[in-house]
Image (spheres, grey):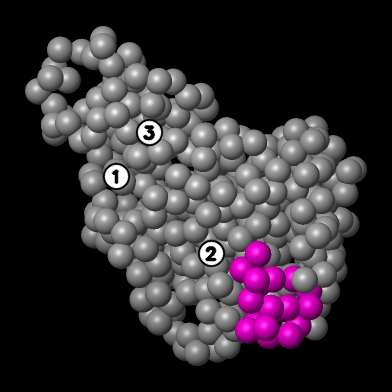
């Protein structure tokens, strides 16, 4: 019932402090403070670890649990003949995700309601996995990004968009996903094609917000990014061709940027193995994406960790690797850790995760080395807790 982390270096989601103690009661954090001033009953607690470095459990704001990350996304989609087949994958991928220290994810598009049911099963303790916010099916225009892989539904006009938002929420969606531009993994459509009209985007955002759901917009090209930001979406996913104007508007409006570097890196590093249309688009985008990411940092846009796991060569549980990549691309380590903890939790409007403080969920990771000194330490958690329960070791 009571567990204690003794004399640890603590990154609490915002700042780092040495020589802390963390007392866990049930599934919640009961107390955090100087180890030497631990409350008396901490002595009766089971000591989980001592002298390690502790962070909140990581958050991945962009995954596709129904997909495994195989080389040909469209072929994987074709072979996935039913929602049941997708659900089996999602169950397995949820378990893999958790073992890497990722205790919360947002699923941004799957087959039918597969991810929604996995989310519910995890929530009620019937399946191992991270806490899951699930968008159900993504909304895309007729013939738009993702129409060919069965993770989206095609909708046109503000009324249809509004109805689709309501139907996804009725089906159990706890987030909404819009395909605001073309994308890398859809043949016959350029990545910078601006898909939904401003009226359609506004209808989606207005409806989703009325139901208390946040809106994520897949947006690569500059026009689609600006339209989505002006319509009031909560996050821009990818944002690979973000302009200075776009970054300035995102900073002003408080729009989050989920750059999903792992998606591009996975494809560019395996360009010979993925379909030619995807390889060409990914290769053409990677330098732009690097510039866009730096623009976001300079403009003070709030950056959040998201992997797009499930896309080619981008396996589940890669949020720690995304943190490493964000640092390699120029984000200071403390900002990268915040992006995967407290800032991600703000985007997802989950006040009790992403931070280690009294009352928060006891989701945390412990490491032998300090990721703030060598970010690669984040790849090897020695202890992972979710809701106070230790998670099985890595496969
Ligand atoms: Zn995605």
Asked if one can make out residue 356 in the rendered structure from this viewpoint, the answer is yes
Instruction: Name the N-terminal-most of marks 3 and 2.
Output: 3
Q: Is residue 122 magenta?
A: no
Q: Is residue 276 magenta?
A: yes
Q: Secondary structure at mark 2?
A: loop
Q: Position of residue 331 (x, y in %)?
A: 67, 40
Report how far apart the C-alphas of labels 3 and 2 lie in the structure. Answer: 26 Å
Quadrant of the frame with the N terminus: top left
Camera-side residue of 65 and 365: 365
Vertical side of 300 occupied by 57: above or below:
below
Q: Position of residue 232 (x, y in %)?
A: 74, 44
Q: Secondary structure at mark 3?
A: strand
Q: Residue at x 13, y 31 (%)?
A: 46
Instruction: Name the N-terminal-most of marks 3 and 1.
Output: 3
Q: Residue at x 13, y 27 (%)?
A: 45
Q: Position of residue 196 (x, y in %)?
A: 80, 63
Relative to 235, is 361 on the left or the right? left
Indicate which label's residue lies in the foreground, 3 or 2.
Answer: 3
Quadrant of the frame with the C terminus: bottom left
Q: Residue at x 83, y 39 (%)?
A: 249
Report how far apart the C-alphas of labels 3 and 1 lie in the structure. Answer: 10 Å
Q: Position of residue 41 (x, y in %)?
A: 13, 17
Pointer 3: residues within 10 angstroms few (<14), some, or many (20+)?
Answer: many
Camera-side residue of 306 and 224: 306
Vertical side of 203 occupied by 332: above or below:
above
Instruction: Name the N-terminal-most of marks 1 and 2.
Output: 2
Span shown in magenta: 265-282
**Mark 2, residue position:** 309
Camera-side residue of 353 and 214: 353
Pointer 2: residues within 10 angstroms few (<14), some, or many (20+)?
Answer: many
**Mark 3, residue position:** 53
């Amino acid at each position: 019932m009571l567990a204690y982390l003794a004399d640890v270096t603590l990154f609490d989601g915002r700042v780092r402090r040495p020589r802390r103690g963390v007392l866990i009661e049930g599934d919640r954090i009961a107390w955090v403070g100087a180890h030497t001033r631990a409350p008396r009953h901490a002595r009766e607690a089971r000591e989980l670890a001592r002298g390690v470095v502790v962070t909140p459990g990581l958050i991945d704001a962009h995954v596709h649990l129904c997909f495994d990350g195989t080389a040909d996304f469209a072929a994987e989609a074709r072979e996935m003949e039913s929602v049941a087949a997708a659900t089996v994958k999602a169950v397995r991928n949820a378990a893999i995700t958790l073992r890497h220290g990722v205790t919360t994810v947002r699923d941004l598009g799957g087959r039918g309601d597969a991810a929604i049911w996995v989310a519910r099963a995890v929530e009620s303790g019937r399946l191992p996995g991270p806490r899951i916010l699930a968008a159900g099916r993504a909304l895309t225009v007729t013939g738009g990004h993702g129409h060919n892989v069965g993770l989206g539904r095609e909708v046109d006009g503000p009324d249809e968009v509004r109805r689709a938002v309501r139907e996804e929420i009725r089906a159990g969606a706890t987030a909404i996903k819009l395909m605001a531009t073309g994308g890398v993994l859809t043949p016959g459509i350029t990545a910078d094609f601006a898909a939904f009209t401003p009226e359609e985007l506004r209808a989606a955002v207005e409806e989703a917000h009325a139901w208390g759901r946040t809106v994520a917009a897949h947006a690569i090209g500059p026009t689609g990014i600006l339209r989505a930001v002006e319509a009031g979406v909560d996050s821009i996913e990818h944002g690979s061709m973000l302009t200075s104007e776009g970054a300035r508007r995102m900073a002003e409006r408080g729009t989050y940027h989920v750059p999903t570097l792992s998606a591009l890196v996975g494809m560019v590093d395996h360009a010979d193995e993925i379909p030619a249309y995807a390889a060409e688009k990914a290769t053409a985008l990677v330098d732009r994406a690097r510039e866009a990411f730096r623009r976001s940092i300079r403009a003070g846009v709030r950056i959040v960790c998201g992997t797009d796991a499930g896309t080619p060569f981008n396996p589940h549980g890669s949020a720690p690797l995304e943190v490493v990549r964000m640092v390699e691309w120029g984000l200071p380590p403390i900002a990268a850790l915040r992006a995967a903890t407290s800032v991600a939790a703000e985007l997802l409007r989950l006040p009790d995760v992403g931070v280690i403080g009294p009352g928060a969920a006891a989701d945390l990771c412990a490491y032998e080395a300090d990721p703030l000194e060598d970010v690669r330490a984040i790849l090897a958690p020695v202890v992972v807790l979710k809701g106070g329960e230790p998670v099985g070791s890595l496969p």
